[in-house]
Amino acid sequence: MGFTHYQPAQLTTVGKRACLWLNDLLMDYNSLLFLKSNVKLRGVKGTTGTQASFMDLFNNDENKVKKLEKLVLKKLGYEKAYPVTGQTYPRKFDYNVLSVLSGIAQSGYRFANDIRLRSERLCSLARFVMSAPINTAFTASTQWFERTLDDSANKRIVIAQTFLAVDGLLKLYMNISENLVVYDKVIDKHIRAELPFMATENIIMEGVKKGGDRQDLHEEIRQLSMKASENVKINGGENNLIDLIKADPKFAAVKDDIADILEPKMYVGRAPSQVTEFIENEVDPILSENRKRLGLKSEINV
């Protein structure tokens, strides 16, 4: 059996990870707003979209037909109608709607896949929703001159089921996210186990600053890292890389600096600041704008 050594990625924070989930939802929210801003009615178009019956009703007075359509739109609370249609509104709109719902499902699946526990139902619903747009794509692309029953019958199933599935998906998303628990000690244990591997480059650089040869130190660290990795994966022991480095004469000059180099906060970059800026600049304005819908009585504060 071969042995593979891996290099851990850089650290991030739980808050930063949560903001990635939230940013997906923010993109879905903006897509939804764009979709809503472009909703149009089929309008007063008649059987095949020619408005022939209305022309007959108003003695071929086109202005009256157009005025009627505007009055109907106003009565129903809409501003725009499609300028041209067949017997139905463009089924491409259904595809656009389900694409937005698919985006929400994608966000939910990513979140649930990261969390993994208690999220199987969310993933299951998300997979169903993500598969729905292809159904409406077929309907939009295979429209006959007017429509056929495979249009209307199929539409009544797929659109209703997709909305219901997204409703269930979001309820599960809320339930899981509201009950998340962060175990600081467990996170710290994992970080302490992997941090030595992540800190090797910093240790090398510090050694170079104090007169060491970079290539020589790099090769020495590589060898020590392999030994430490074997101790963990083959012998079932602890990660003893730092002890190996401290005991190595080539790293004697940085022995007293290693504790500072192993400070986890040194490896998360701007993650804490990114979280604060994202929440303040992107999320809080949306929450404040919708606070009545959310049942919030006051402005949002970080």
Image (cartoon, grey):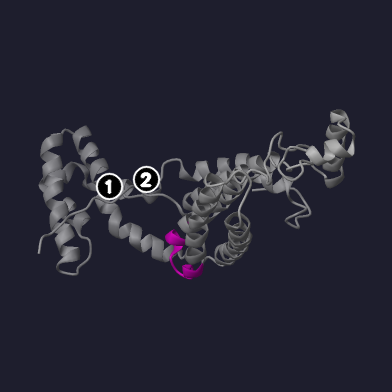
253 over 226 or under it: above or below? above
What's the residue at 77%, 51% (across, down)? 298
Q: Residues within 10 Å of mark 2 (few under 14, many from 20)?
A: some
Mark 1 crowdedness (10 Å alpha carbons): few <14, some 14-19, many ≥20:
some
Question: Is residue 4 found left or right of 33 in the rendered image?
Answer: left
Circle 1: element type: loop
Q: Secondary structure at mark 2?
A: helix
**Which amino acid does the dot numbered 1 rest on?**
Ala
Residue drawn at 72 percent across, 40 percent down: 49
Q: Is residue 195 left or right of residue 90?
A: left
Residue 262 horizontal/vertical position (percent): 31, 50
Using the image, tell me which numbered label, if any, was put on residue 55. Answer: none
Is 118 colored magenta in this rendering? Answer: yes
Sequence-wise, which precedes: disc 2 or disc 1? 1
Q: Position of residue 267 (x, y in %)?
A: 37, 45
Specify the quadrant of the image occupied by residue 209: top left
In magenta, the rendered stretch is: 111-121
Q: Nearer the viewer, residue 130 or 91?
A: 91
- What type is the residue that disc 2 sits on? Tyr
**CB atoms at circles 2 and 1 under 8 Å apart?**
yes
In the image, taking residue 238 as reference, residue 66 lies left or right, namely right
Disc sitting over residue 199 in the figure: 1
Q: Main secondary structure of the magenta part?
A: helix
Q: Of the numbered discs in the image, which one, if any, rests on residue 267? A: 2
Residue 52 coordinates in the image, percent (x, y): 79, 38
Q: Depth check: 194 or 4 in front?
A: 4
Q: Residue at x 17, y 51 (%)?
A: 245
Residue 131 colored magenta? no
Does residue 302 appear in this view? yes
Quadrant of image for the N terminus: bottom left
